[in-house]
Image (tube, coloured by chain):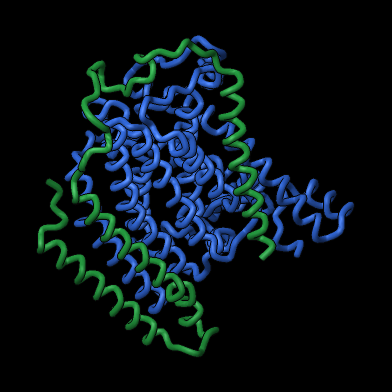
């Protein structure tokens, strides 16, 4: 049983196991892991909001936030505190239950996906053997939050924004699911930890390179679909200020709004971690086949590599946002159903052929 | 099963965390006196006309149906793709790679022809 439980660290996990009977030690380790993930979830938006503003500013040759803390590092803490002390306004005619339930769903869903992400060899709350299906199922929950928010707000902008977001999310979710199926197909397992372990070896053993050509195509497809799933970059029609005011968050203020905001940034982090897990070798150090460099890279803890790779993917998401013009809603739907979906299904079939023929780099 | 018990605890603690933040804010937040203007729906300073739950495009419904089909499809494909590598490696001998591949192909072909049909009927055009 101890083999299934991945404690927060080896040392703490062993300490708990030494002092408690096996079954309760397992649960205690799980709760410790969940607590650690909750703290991470609370801190990630603070960092990512600052990063987003800084990246955006430097793309436009500005400085961005500079006043609060060193180079504005405490700006997002200040913003978060401000939102905590703001009153939550409920518009007349809004559905109370739905209005207050809606922000809880996306925030909880984004946190729940984090519980099965392997941050390091022994840094994972729990590992499910159907991890990929769990990811697909749980990330689908945030759509309910968005639709509920739009419907219960009693505001026409909210309703239309929520409908657009919902249509966008469910469309691009299919592409994501099919690429995840491709990774399950080529690695032969659905557990996220074992998907990472199937990429052991050099850099060429990561799934982005291991399937000659196909891996890169799948990676690009996954990035495009993730960007759309995050409602950002060129696909941010649901928050198009010029048409829909604030989309489904128009009527939200104070902490309820910041919960949607938190979910958005945690989702961005989760998308980065999943891309890293599926294509970039997760917590494995990049091995390039040079003896000393490899030893040096191997000495760096796995979670450092994991966060570096994740930050790189997140930087790509931010880069997209300032590089491409926003798509219209019809272009967005046609891109998914007429371009991405057929390509992804072909990629899946090709993946099956590659596995059957053994066209995988050794 | 113990892994799923952990997930259950995570669902409980996660909801508690988010709900706790909202309740904390409710206790801490500054409040302004109630007025009619304050609770009015925000429509860029216009007076809202009628109810907000208006009729909207039926197109959303069609895309929801398409989503349902393809999402279920990925769920049905899941067992097939999970064992595919083990079958080709020979560690599962109940079925052969050729059989699995043909099954995968037929299933995807039927779905893709559905997509092509919807495409030809003009369902995928967003007006």
- Give the quadrant of residue A37: top right
Q: Position of residue A96 (x, y in %)?
A: 45, 34
Residue located 51% across and 79% down the image: B86
Residue located 49% across and 90% down the image: B94
For residue A223, above or below residue A278? above
Q: Can you see residue A201?
A: no
> What is the drawing colour of chain A?
blue
Q: Position of residue B101 (x, y in %)?
A: 35, 81
Q: Where is residue A79 in the image (x, y as percent from the top left)?
A: 50, 18
Location of the N terminus of chain A (image quadrant)? bottom right
Task: Give whichever of A138, A219 is nearer the camera.
Answer: A138
Farthest residue in the right direction? Answer: A19
Task: Give whichever of A341, A210 is nearer the camera.
Answer: A341
Residue located 30% across and 61% down the image: A344
- Give the quadrant of residue A69: top right
Farthest residue in the bottom direction? Answer: B94
Classify residue B122 as left or right of residue A158: left
Classify residue B108 as left or right of residue A36: left
Task: Give whichever of A98, A316 is nearer the camera.
Answer: A98
> What is the drawing colour of chain B?
green
């Amino acid at each position: 049983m101890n083999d299934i439980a991945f404690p927060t660290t080896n040392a703490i996990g062993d300490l708990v196991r030494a002092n408690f009977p096996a079954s309760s030690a397992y649960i205690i380790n799980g709760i410790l892991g969940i607590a650690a993930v909750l703290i991470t979830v609370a801190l990630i938006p603070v960092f990512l909001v600052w990063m987003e503003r800084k990246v955006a500013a430097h793309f436009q040759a500005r400085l961005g936030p500079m006043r609060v803390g060193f180079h504005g590092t405490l700006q997002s803490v200040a913003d978060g505190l401000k939102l905590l002390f703001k009153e939550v306004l409920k518009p007349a005619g809004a559905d109370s239950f739905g209005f207050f339930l809606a922000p809880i769903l996306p925030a909880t869903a984004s946190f729940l996906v984090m519980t099965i992400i392997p941050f390091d060899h022994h840094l994972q709350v729990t590992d499910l053997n159907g991890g990929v299906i769990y990811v697909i199922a749980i990330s689908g929950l945030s759509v309910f939050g968005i639709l509920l928010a739009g419907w219960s707000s009693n505001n026409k902008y909210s309703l239309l924004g929520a409908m657009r977001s919902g249509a966008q999310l469910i469309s691009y979710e299919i592409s994501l699911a099919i690429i995840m199926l491709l990774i399950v197909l080529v690695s032969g397992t659905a557990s996220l930890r074992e998907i990472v372990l199937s990429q052991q070896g050099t850099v060429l053993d990561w799934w982005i390179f291991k399937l000659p050509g196909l891996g890169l195509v799948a990676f690009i497809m996954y990035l495009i679909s993730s960007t759309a799933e995050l409602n950002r970059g060129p696909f941010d029609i649901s928050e198009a200020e010029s048409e829909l005011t604030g989309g489904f968050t128009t009527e939200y203020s104070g902490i309820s709004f910041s919960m949607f905001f938190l979910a958005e940034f945690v989702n961005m982090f989760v998308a980065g971690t999943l891309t890293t897990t599926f294509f970039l070798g997760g917590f494995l150090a990049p091995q390039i086949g040079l003896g000393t460099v490899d030893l040096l890279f191997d000495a760096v803890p796995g979670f450092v590599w994991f966060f570096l790779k994740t930050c790189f993917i997140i930087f790509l998401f931010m880069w997209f946002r300032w590089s491409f013009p926003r798509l219209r809603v019809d272009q967005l739907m046609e891109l998914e159903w007429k371009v991405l979906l057929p390509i992804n299904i072909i990629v899946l079939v090709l993946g099956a052929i590659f596995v059957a023929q053994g066209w995988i780099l050794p | 099963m113990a892994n799923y018990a952990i997930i259950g605890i995570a669902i409980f603690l996660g909801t508690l965390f988010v709900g706790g933040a909202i309740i904390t804010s409710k206790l801490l937040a500054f409040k302004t006196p109630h007025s009619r203007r304050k609770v009015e729906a925000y429509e860029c300073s216009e007076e809202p006309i009628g109810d907000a739950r208006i009729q909207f495009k039926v197109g959303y419904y069609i895309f929801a149906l398409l989503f349902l089909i393809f999402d279920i499809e990925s769920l049905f494909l899941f067992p097939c793709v999970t064992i595919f590598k083990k079958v080709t490696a020979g560690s599962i001998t109940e079925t052969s790679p050729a059989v699995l591949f043909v099954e995968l192909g037929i299933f995807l072909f039927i779905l893709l022809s559905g997509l092509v049909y919807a495409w030809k009927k003009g369902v995928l055009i967003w007006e």
